Amino acid sequence: MRRGIEKESLRTTPDGGLALTPHPLALGSALTHPHITTDFSESQLELVTGAFTRVEDTFAQLGELHQAVAQALGDERMWVSSMPCCLPSEEAIPLGQYGASHIGRVKTVYRQGLSHRYGRRMQTISGIHYNWSLPGLGNDEYFHLIRNFRRDSFLLLWLFGASPAVCASFVDGLPHGLEPLGSGTLHLPHATSLRMGRLGYQSEAQASLAVSYNGLAGYGATLEDAMTRSWPAYQAIGLRDEQGGWRQLSTHLLQIENEFYGTIRPKRTIHSGERPLHALRERGVEYVEVRCMDLDPFEPLGIAPDTARVIDLFLLHCLASDSPPDSPEEIAALSENQQRVAARGREPGLRLSRGGAEVVLVEWAAELLEGCEPIARRMDAALGGQAYRQALAGAQSRLLHPDALPSARVLREAGDTWRGEYAAMIAALSQATRRVLLAQPLSTERALHWAALADRSLREQARIEAEQQGSFDDFVTDYLDARRLLA
């Protein structure tokens, strides 16, 4: 198995506000750095590890990335929660900037489109993406795994969801259905992950997509249709503003592949300038990207090694279990399950839909974790030690002690220690994390390694900008040509 981690975090000021400064030059180019970039906002860091066969190696690199970033941020710090800090007005949230090259400008225009379609606040939500592969799997096996993941991923939301509250600025002027917790804080008392609920990455347009995961052909056809079909609400936004500036890349339901939101994606490493769907169709699925993981504010790196081991076991269980084809009816039921767990996951006796019947969440969860036990034994037998069995036992103990879940701990500590002031608590945890990282400086050799990567990325961006040809409009037309989606 190989796994890598992508971790998003907002940059914030010492008082817990959104940092409005440019991406630090010491971190290199957000366009070309292989491990440090930005997500939607210029203020939203994204740290990307390589893919490793050992959990320990993945976390060693993730730790180095955090140390290098902490050194470069000065007084700023990484916000340790998925739900954002207290935000300024929509217009003041800066879009990611990637330089003057055509591909760099495409990235910014795409984000401009997201801001018009969904609002900038929603896009500042951050999370963990867990990239996982197993040698020898083909397209059918990966889609087999994905179908079962979508059926059972409520388990990961329940075990690891850590965003039951949010600063009131996030929903200012919007209907939300949340309850007050303290001054400037809103929450749901049994929520696990507001990030994965109706306040998070949701879209009425995308809800119209009944994406089937019964195979690569059907999945690809659905995405191609979404990227070539105009959507009335996006047509109303328009392609350009009155001054001729770009509002969005297209008026289609999806501008590009990355706009499709989901708890898991089939992925393939792309070549320079290649469209992701073309890469998938031509060379097949290379790995899956698990996208439903919240940042754990009590973990300095946002995720614990034992969490990674539970995800490994869960993915292997998805692969080893029977996986019948999905249907539109099941897809709708799974969406409703996700909403229930996100908003009410710790509610005693909560039931979910499975096969047309209602089952108690904790009973279904216990069944899934029990099914992971033989896999954990096999893993530990192969690798030595007891790490996988211990990680699984920790997850099973939470079935009996749900007050130990991260979502419960967030609300308990916010209420008991911080008078319900969620943002103040997360700001304090962010500062504590900064102190931990700065107290563990990189060795001179490793610091020079990351400095050299940053410098190389800046030179690579300069090369791309110097060598580009043609107009930006022609570049966009060519990049979005539907023929580039085909194998």
Image: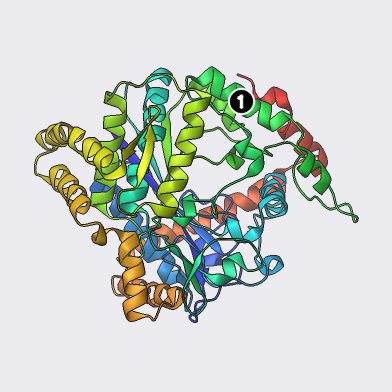
Q: Position of residue 443 (x, y in %)?
A: 29, 65
Q: How has the structure been colored for display?
A: rainbow
Pick the residue in front: 453 or 425: 425
Could you tell me the amino acid type at mark 1? Thr
Q: Position of residue 201 (x, y in %)?
A: 55, 49
Q: Is residue 377 left or right of residue 251?
A: left
Could you say which is closer to the camera, residue 290 or residue 22?
Answer: 290
Q: Quadrant of residue 476?
A: top right
Read off the residue under disc 1.
222
Q: Is residue 482 left or right of residue 354?
A: right
The residue that appears at 59% across and 51% down in the rendered structure is 31
Could you tell me which residue is drawn at 9 percent across and 40 percent down?
384
Q: Is residue 108 left or right of residue 350?
A: right
Q: Residue at x 50, y 21 (%)?
A: 283
Name the secondary structure under disc 1.
helix
Q: In the figure, is residue 316 to the left or right of 145?
A: left
For the N terminus, the quadrant is: top left
Q: Position of residue 20 (x, y in %)?
A: 61, 72
**Residue 61 sits above or below residue 273 on the image:** below
Visible residue check, residue 363: yes
The x and y percentages for residue 487 are 60, 19
Residue depicted at x 48% and y 75%: 76
Question: How dense is the environment of label 1, judged by Cα within 10 Å: few (below 14), some, or many (20 and up)?
Answer: some
Task: State which quadrant residue 379 falls in.
Answer: top left
What is the number of callouts on the image?
Answer: 1
Q: Is residue 138 above or below residue 427?
A: above
Report if residue 239 is visible in the image: no
Front residue of 474 and 263: 263
- Viewer-nearest residue: 375 or 271: 375
